[in-house]
Structure formats: C-alpha cells, structure tokens
Image (tube, rainbow, N blue to C red):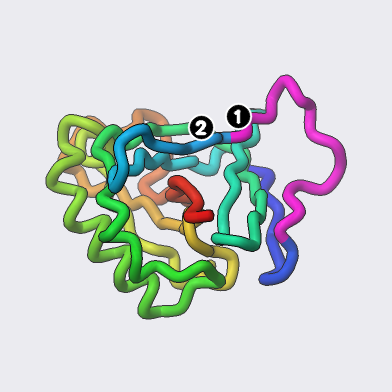
C-alpha cells in the first residue's frame, strides 16, 4: 500500500507526480439540503488515488490509494456538527463512532454490513483526520459475505462533503 504519512500540518498529498489517469478528485455535494452522501476509501494497492477537499476552510486535499465504496445512506449534516475541522480530538472520534454506529443499521442494504465489516475511528490516526477525512479501521465481523480475499482488518478513510 502506498499512502503518504501526513504530518498534522502537511496536507499536500502524495509525493511525486501521480498519473492523472489514476487520480480521482471527489467533488462531493448534495442537491438535498441537510443530507450529504459519503464514501469509504479502502486502502489497497489499486494504483488509483482518491482525494477530497476537507478540513473546513483549510481546504486540504489529502489522498489515499485504494478502492471506493459509496455509502448510499445520506448523512444528516446536523449529525456531523460535533466533528471538528481537525485534526480530530478524542471527543470528535467518539462523535464519529456514534454516528457510524447509528448509520450501521441503515447500511445493511447499502454498504458495510453486507460487506461483513464494522467501522471504528482509528485513534492512532487522529492527528491525520479532519472534517470530511476520518481514518477508520474496518474489522471483519462475520455477519456478511465479506470482501473475499481481503484481510480481516483494513484501513479506510470515511469522506464526505467539506463544510466550506
């Protein structure tokens, strides 16, 4: 896997020049006020790098190599208000975990549950997380079919619309 380890103030993205044919800039927005789609970028050596504008008015553009899983259950943006602009604090991670737990029951037809993974904020990567770019640990829970051939634990980023 090739991800750049960010310093808390370094949001420049990958080192070197990525192949534009393998670079996807997510432009996440919603036509419905108060409802925001979200995505998981699962870290995996695919050769495709995903980036999103994150971090509130800081407008950071971190990136991650992997594959994209759309979460079709929209987020009520009011639920995200406890999540700070970053870097995230433990209280922000707790709020994000509560939101993930609340959404998990809705995801059975849309995302993680049918994949057989649970999601929790990765506390070791809080300094690298911010609003709309939250590092997660995905752990196989045995309840779904799973992502065949992938390990029991994966790293991912949960990303959604930036607030600015």
What distance separates the C-alpha of mark 1 from that of mark 2? 7 Å
Does the rendering let one see residue 156?
A: no
* Left or right placement of residue 47 versus residue 151 in this view: right
* Magenta residue check for 15: yes
* Left or right placement of residue 160 versus residue 50 in this view: left
Closest to the observer, 11 or 139: 11
Please say if the residues under marks 1 and 2 sit with CB atoms less than 8 Å apart. Answer: yes
Picture coordinates of residue 117, whole percent (x, y): 28, 45
Closest to the observer, 93 or 4: 93
Q: Earlier in the sequence, mark 1 or mark 2?
A: 1
Q: Of the numbered discs in the image, which one, if any, rests on residue 103?
A: none
Q: Of the numbered discs in the image, which one, if any, rests on residue 67?
A: 2
Q: Secondary structure at mark 2?
A: strand
Closest to the observer, 109 or 78: 78
Q: Nearer the viewer, mark 1 or mark 2?
A: 2
* Magenta residue check for 111: no
Picture coordinates of residue 54, whole percent (x, y): 57, 53
Question: Neighbour class for label 1 at 10 Å: few (<14), some, many (≥20)?
Answer: few
Which residues make up the magenta segment?
A: 11-25
User: Can you identify the residue that label 1 sits on?
Assistant: 46
Q: What secondary structure do most residues of the magenta stretch adopt?
A: loop
Residue in view at x 53 percent, y 64 percent: 129
Q: Quadrant of residue 80?
A: bottom left
* Left or right placement of residue 51 versus residue 93 in this view: right
């Amino acid at each position: 896997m090739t991800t750049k380890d960010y310093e808390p103030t370094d949001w420049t993205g990958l080192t070197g020049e990525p192949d534009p044919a393998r670079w996807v800039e997510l432009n996440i927005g919603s036509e419905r006020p108060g409802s925001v789609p979200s995505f998981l970028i699962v870290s995996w050596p695919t050769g495709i790098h995903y980036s999103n504008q994150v971090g509130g008015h800081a407008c950071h553009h971190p990136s991650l190599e992997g594959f994209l899983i759309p979460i079709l259950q929209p987020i009520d943006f009011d639920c995200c208000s406890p999540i700070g602009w970053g870097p995230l604090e433990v209280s922000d991670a707790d709020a994000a975990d509560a939101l993930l737990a609340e959404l998990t029951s809705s995801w059975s037809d849309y995302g993680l549950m049918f994949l057989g993974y649970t999601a929790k904020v990765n506390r070791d990567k809080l300094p690298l997380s911010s609003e709309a770019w939250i590092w997660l640990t995905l752990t196989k829970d045995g309840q779904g079919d799973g992502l065949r051939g992938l390990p029991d634990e994966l790293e991912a980023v949960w990303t959604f619309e930036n607030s600015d």
